[in-house]
Amino acid sequence: MTNIPSDYDENSPIEIAASEWLARLDRGLTPEEQDSYTEWLAQDAAHREAIGRYLNDWDDFDRLAGIHLKHHARIDPDLLVPEHLQTLKGRSLVQNIVLFSSLPFAAMIALVFYFAVSSPEETSGLKVQPALELLARIEQRTLEDGSVVEINRESVVRAEYTDSERRVYLTKGEANFDVAKDPDRPFIVNVAGVDVRAVGTVFSVKLSKNEVDVIVTEGIVNVKPSASLFDTEQSIADSFLEIGQRAKVNLRTDVPVVEVTSIDGTEIDVAHRWQPRLLDHDEILLGELVEEFNSSNPIQVTLSDPSLANVSLSSSFWSDNVEGFVRLMESSFGMEAEWRGSREIVLREAN
Amino acid sequence: MPQRETEQSSWFVDAVLPHEPGLRRWIHSRFSAIRDVDDLIQETFSRILKIHESGPIPNPQAFLFVVSRNLAINKLQRMGLEYAPETEELDPLVLADEMAGPFESAALQEEIDQLVAAIQSLPDRCRQVMTLKKIYGLTQKEVAAKLGISEHTVEAQIGIGMRKCTAFFQQRGYKTRNSR
């Protein structure tokens, strides 16, 4: 509702052209259309004025997002028909509207919500609940300096940046760091009192009960257990790691020792299996696909009938997308998925 | 106007920010091809702030999802990827999220009512298209599937709908705080 001219004529050629461009912009322009749109804009200031007004008003209508009624959780194209609205007792529309986002694409979140609210009693005899945190996708976080951290499920990473250093705390689990270069501000991951220091490298850090495990896949890092945290007066040796090297620090000894070994590509792949990758196959046997999926996820898929392993199919989904995998199997390959325990899914042919 | 700014930022903190983790998770799960999620969220936030500046947003959460979804689909298109529309009978799963607060004033309610009235004034097909686009946030493709009409018709109805809404606002002399 911005600056509508007093002589507005909805049938004028400019208004028709501008509103049609709006509709195309909303759908997404083809490269050819992009060119003619630029040309059309350049032709006349009135064109620019008109499309600017339509774009503004179009965005204005986004305010109405999600104002459905409680009893209209389903998508209803006739939601705004006056008779439909009469079911609201008296007051103005917005006051009565219970605001939900019952949008179809909120499915994943809603799924999480469902599992979070249903009590075991309610679901006993029904599907077993999967562990929520295991369904989440692997988180990829870009830090303020552009460094990218891939954080495994059930892991916790916190960044504290100052002018002189970039310090990141890994307090649980494991993560892979792709560090943006900045020689003036070292990047340090602190994990259980061990400092892993880098300048522009890629490395992963894993914290388990008794040890810290560091693997370098690019550049050089320095691993140094901090003396004060280990409560020792003795000096602790630090170690430099190069590409293809792994350091393990045992946290249960009095004086921590950094043990460095060299590892090959296969070992690195195994250690990094949790990191998301696209499982993109034109033709693969279901048995192989399941194996690949299982090696990347804490949730394990089994096949009810071993002969299913020989079913040939094509696939394209991210290895950490548990929900997507299950949905793909159900919607495209006629399977039925059943949760058995919180970490196991059984696939069988749907009846 | 410092007063306005304070209102704006406390609204943002109370009504918008709490939805960020959910939004982030959802973008990750639904649009795994998009790696720069921070960027997408930033863009969505700046849109919601701009729109809120000029009038009320009854359901900030739904707004965030609808707008970020549109931005994500645009991004995919620019990457040369096709967005597969949701198949129809997905559960109408409900995130029971109460409105962040009651409407601030009658004047603000009126602005929402104006938008609703404009859509109500449209011919049936137009009204349905605008409802599915703006209240449910569907893409043109999804609207076409839902109504069983061609995508071309949906596109044409959007143009017609916006011209008729503009005429409606002009005849009624409707204004937002944005209008000069």
Image (cartoon, rainbow, N blue to C red):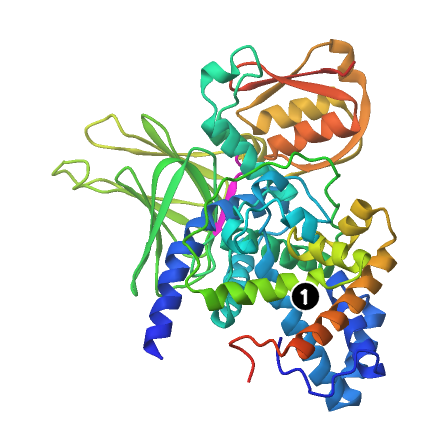
Is residue A218 visible to the viewer in this orientation of the structure?
A: no
Q: Nearer the viewer, residue A51 or B74?
A: A51
Is residue B171 visible to the viewer in this orientation of the structure?
A: yes
Query: In the rendered view, does A282 fall on the left or right side of A112?
Result: right
Q: Is residue B173 above or below residue A324?
A: below
Q: Nearer the viewer, residue A313 or A177?
A: A313
**Mark 1 is on which residue type?**
Ala
The N terminus of chain B lies in quadrant: bottom left
Q: Residue at x 37, y 72 (%)?
A: B5
Q: Residue at x 77, y 80 (%)?
A: A38
- Based on the picture, tell me whether residue A137 belongs to the magenta stretch: yes
Q: Which residues are magenta?
A: A136-141
Q: Position of residue A293 (x, y in %)?
A: 63, 27
Q: Position of residue A106 (x, y in %)?
A: 59, 42
Q: Position of residue A268 (x, y in %)?
A: 53, 34
The C terminus of chain B lies in quadrant: bottom right
Q: Residue at x 49, y 17 (%)?
A: A122
Q: Residue at x 75, y 53 (%)?
A: B81
Which chain letter matches label 1?
Answer: B
Q: Nearer the viewer, residue A83 or B25?
A: A83
Q: Position of residue A45 (x, y in %)?
A: 73, 90
Query: In the rendered view, does A46 fall on the left or right side of A3?
Result: right
Q: Residues within 10 Å of mark 1 (few under 14, many from 20)?
A: some
For residue B125, what is the image quadrant? bottom right
> Circle 1 sits on which residue?
B118
Disc 1, SS: helix
For residue B151, what is the image quadrant? bottom right
Q: Is residue B159 above or below residue A300?
A: below
